[in-house]
Amino acid sequence: MNYSEIDALIKSDDSSDRRMAASMLAEVGNDPEAIERLVELLKDTNGGVRDASQSALMFLGGHYTVEKVVPFVAEIDPGLRNAAIDILRKIGDDGIDVLHALAVDKNDDIRLFVLDILGTIGNPESVDVLIGALKDPNPNVRNAAVVSLGLLGHPKAFEHLKPLVEDEEWIRFSAIESLSQVPHENTPGFLLEQLDRWSHDELTISALLETMGKIRPKQCVSALILMLENANAYIETEIVKALLKIISPDEIALLPPQDAHIIKTIIDMHLLDVDDELLFDMLAVLSRIGDHASVKAMIALVRSTDPDVHPERISSVTDALCRISDIKDMVELLDSEDKLKILAANVLAKIGKADGARAICERIFSSQGHVKRAMTDALAAIGGASLRETFHALLNDPDGHVISSSLHALGRNGDPDDIGVMEPFLNHRYPDVREVAIQSIVLIGTLRAEDVFMLMTKDVDPSKRIVGLNGLERMISPCLHEAADVLLGDDNWEVRAAAVNVIRNKDLPINTGTLKALLSDEHEQIRYTALDIAGLKKVKELRPYLEDAITGQDMWAASHAIEALGRFKDEQAKARLLHLLICGSDFLRISAVKTIALWEEEALAAELEPYLDDPNPDVARAVVDAIDRLQEVSF
């Protein structure tokens, strides 16, 4: 190949030319001359040129590339050396023999980097080379071999890694870590031996236990529990941490009682001094085997925790306390500080039943703020007819949350006699309270609820008329059509809008003359909904109104009219929609395309295909989506 053009670019003072040369060399293929030029460009002083050369060499790969790049591992320039290492991590397997030969190079740094690269490559053929390097006189090199053997994870490495536990401390830790990655049937026994051998060394014990947690040898559980008897505070925490990795909370609950109790006692003592990951595991165990002492430990944890900063801790403690189900302790907490009162209320909400409800009722009216809210929520969760009068009294509270929670509870209780008590809250100043009042009355139902809502549709206050209609709609009341029909002629446009929405959403009958009048309503939202109804009901007499809207100045009315026209699904509508694609504005064309997509006629896809290359990308995208849908391939 003639490299004259590329060579000219390489010699250019312009770095962009040299980057171009690197890209062109990558396209040449695995030609030694191309690789040699790229290797030279790798030494360029410009970072962009180096990056381009590096990418090209990674792309080409091959044995020759490995041979040419390997010498740079010994470079003093860290940028060039790191580039070579990155290349070899990527393509080193193509010349694995070259790397193996360098594993015994006289240069310590070369051996170190090559062994590190071999671990990243992960070729099983490198196992013996790495094992040989475990005896290297340089501790950095030995450590690199240890780490790489762990990455390869070959069982053969087990026997050779064992002696490295006697090496320098930092190599020992690497060896212990690598053993967690090397599957071998004798690893658990060896780790137990080392736990005894290094019993005086907390850091080594910790590393061994961490490896235990990773390989999860259940045959070691009894031995680990036995170690707890003589372990100091630090080690017993590490042992429990390993145990929680080895066996599940449910399995711990099935241990002999004395063993489970030892684990529980240690967890109780250390809840306040472990990280969150271990804490959540510990709480999961306490939820199965915890007792009164565990409850006290969890209360101490909550007392020292800011619920706004660590809500997940409070949630985990709450779950654990619910499973332990100690109602007596939770009742006692109701007389503690506010944070613990809220905790107790949240737990009693799930486990309290009659005793918990009674205890809360005795305290709720002397409580305030978030505590009162939590207690109200707890009573609402417990529920029951016996709490009815309490909820009636709580409805007098100024706190909207307390009122809403009480209304919810009364609604779930389902006593029609409560509707009269709840009715005033349909006019409450807080929207969320009004919403809950509607929901709760609808939940109770009955003719009494229907009468309340029907009467509201005749109220002088427009907002109340809307609430009444809303209630009837949610009840799916037989009176809904009558009420909506009357309110279509209301003086207030918001009431008319609510009524016409009900007609559309519930597909209720509507007089054509009334619908025609709504098409000329002074408020646009009502006109738009009326257009929707004309299409949904396919009112032929109103097709001219649809045409007028399509050609009018109101683009949104035109869009609604196009969709309404499309619902007729006849030849006349099809022709009109396709005509809009030819001469309509882009906004209307997109509306027409989306409407055609709803026809579910695959043949229409061919009509849309000419517009796949429309100059307006939004139109073209709408056409693609429509064709996909028509051909039933849209995802």
Image (tube, rainbow, N blue to C red):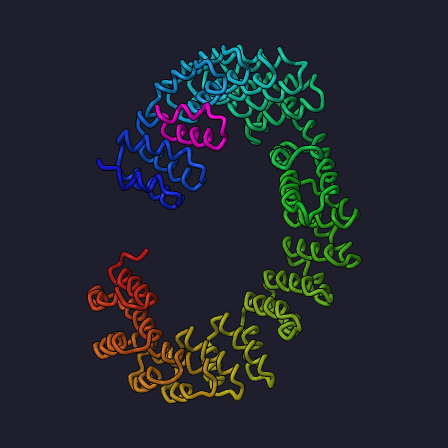
Q: Looking at the magenta stretch, what is its main secondary structure?
A: helix
486 drawn magenta: no
The quadrant in which the C terminus is found is bottom left
The quadrant in which the N terminus is found is top left
Q: Is residue 140 above or below residue 570?
A: above
Near-viewer residue (436 or 328): 436
Q: For residue 273, which quarter of the picture?
A: top right
For this view, does 148 lie left or right of residue 272? left
Q: Is residue 152 above or below residue 349?
A: above
Residue at 35% from the left image edge and 74% from the top image edge: 587
Q: Position of residue 184 (x, y in %)?
A: 45, 16
Q: Position of residue 324 (x, y in %)?
A: 65, 38
Residue 348 visible here? no
For this view, does 215 lie left or right of residue 92? right
Near-viewer residue (375 or 620): 620
Q: Which portion, as a residue range, is magenta?
A: 67-92
Near-viewer residue (44 or 413): 44
How many labels, in total? 0
Residue at 38% from the left image edge and 40% from the top image edge: 52
Residue at 31% from the left image edge and 62% from the top image edge: 625
Q: For residue 94, which quarter of the picture?
A: top left
86 drawn magenta: yes
Residue at 33% from the left image edge and 71% from the top image edge: 590
Q: Is residue 506 above or below residue 523?
A: above
Q: Position of residue 106 (x, y in %)?
A: 46, 13
For this view, does 587 lie left or right of residue 224? left
Q: Position of residue 606 (x, y in %)?
A: 20, 65
Q: Is residue 620 above or below residue 221?
A: below
Residue 582 visible here? yes
